[in-house]
Image: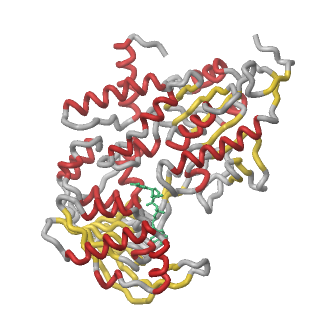
Amino acid sequence: MADGNKVVKVGSPERPLRVAIIGSGPSGFYAAEALLNAKDLAVQVDMFDRLPTPYGLVRGGVAPDHQKIKNVTMVYEKIAARPAFRFFGNVMLGRDIQVDDLRRHYDHIVYAVGNESDRRLKVPGEDLKGSHSATAFVGWYNGHPDWRKEDFDLSQESAAVIGIGNVAIDVTRILAEDVEVLAKTDMARHAVEALRGSRVKTVWLLGRRGPVQAAFSPAELKELCELHSSDLVVREDELKLDEVSRAALEKDPEAKKNYDLLVQQAKKGEGSRPRKICLRFCVSPTELIEGNGRVAKMKLEINQLVADGKGGLKAQGTGQTEVIDAGLVFRSVGYHGVPIPGVPFDAKAGHIPNKDGRVLDDKAAVVAGAYVVGWAKRGPSGLIGTNRADSVLTVKAMLEDVAKLSAPVEESKTPEAALATVKARQPDFVTFQDWKLLETLELSRGKQSGKIREKFTTVAEMLEAIKKARQEACLVK
Ligand code: NAP
């Protein structure tokens, strides 16, 4: 029985630091790892996810033909196996549990919620049928339950992807790659079937600035140059560099690698493969044009690069325009966070306001016990590994704060009390052991159909499968 009057140091064996991590993507797992590895700290970590499945963008974002990247989940599994770690899947903050519940059961809350929405173009015609976000397409082909019901009209011959970051490259590659290559991966079955019927012949890939300012990485560009069924077509005239870009190229080895690849590719001309990826630089969509009740064409304005006042270059329209066919459009111009009830949110920046990972309220004052990591902290940038160092920094702030923290030994701040609340609010919560049962089923379904994995793509299906698997394994939650 806990003694309610005795005040002890939080983080001591008598009164472990209790942490709730909201979100089970890379940044959440790296925060858990840093906490569990902290010296001289007794800590209990509960990780929550609104989906029954863990791993965030590693499962729902990383492209199906990039399986090696997904091996990082082996590290996360080891973290999840630590005795002081628990996973509560299918428990959504703001729906099943509230911030006040978390405050009752935990000393610290870490928001690792990523950026679940996307930026908009703000041009006429953006909401026409056939115009989509890359987020929706990526979620759809990766079998994310939120995007299961999306419908992409792949009977169109010409598609356009706006933006030239790595997400745009992923979307372009999935549209342009030989579907039989993708069919062996963990791509969702509905996406493989739809892509088998695709009539897309041309994919426009549209950058508003020049080749040196492109956000894609050389490895991703190289893959686009080496697809089985598509040629990457680059215009030599769009590779001419101004002085500032030329100087930037010398200082940036990644940009130099990109540029050299683009020069080589431009020399190859149109090629002979059945599909074409037409990469364009210094063009901005100014209007999506309707035809037969859906997007049919896109008006592009040619840009010039001008000083942005910060030593870089920005795109400025020249007034000169052209029109391309585009029956299917994907905007891939960056992600944007979504607010959670009871959690501060900077609507303009699209993330949780913070200083060094400590959450700030609307008066820029620190919210005691609230922290943030990953894209929810710094916006949608960086690769998976970037999140490790970022989460370590937030945990550093948490450890500084906990060093000053003493509290009574309270019954509400125990694993049992937290579990009782979860059980009461969401009886269908999913443990990590449940997830492993589901994963075994996904892998065996994949094996049967010659794929790496056949994902379950609705929450109802997942819960049903877990229930059956539990019964078969005689497991009680
Ligand atoms: P990103 O790297 O920030 O790229 C966004 C792109 O959109 C840029 O080309 C940007 O151009 C353009 N853009 C922004 N606003 C625009 C507008 N209004 N009109 C036209 N273009 C506009 O974002 P992302 O591609 O979503 O990727 C997010 C992060 O995930 C990145 O760090 C990325 O490297 C990472 N990621 C990595 C991989 C991988 O490693 N394979 C795969 C996917 C994602 P400006 O530069 O001119 O702003």
Closest to the observer, 440 or 313? 313
Where ligand 1 lies, by image quadrant?
bottom left
Q: Residue at x 31, y 46 (%)?
A: 64
Q: How many marks?
A: 0
Instruction: Return the x and y of residue 457 as percentages of the image width and height.
Output: 35, 38
On screen, residue 228 versus residue 47, left or right, reads left
Closest to the observer, 295 or 311? 311
**As drawn, 287 above or below 60:** below
> In which image quadrant can residue 221 be found?
bottom left
Instruction: Return the x and y of residue 393 as percentages of the image width and height.
Output: 65, 46
**Which color scheme is applied?**
secondary structure
Instruction: Return the x and y of residue 153 as percentages of the image width and height.
Output: 26, 58
Q: Is residue 285 visible?
A: no
**As drawn, 326 above or below 424:** below
On screen, residue 57 versus residue 392, left or right, reads left
On screen, residue 202 versus residue 461, left or right, reads left
Q: Is residue 421 visible?
A: yes
**As drawn, 418 above or below 210:** above
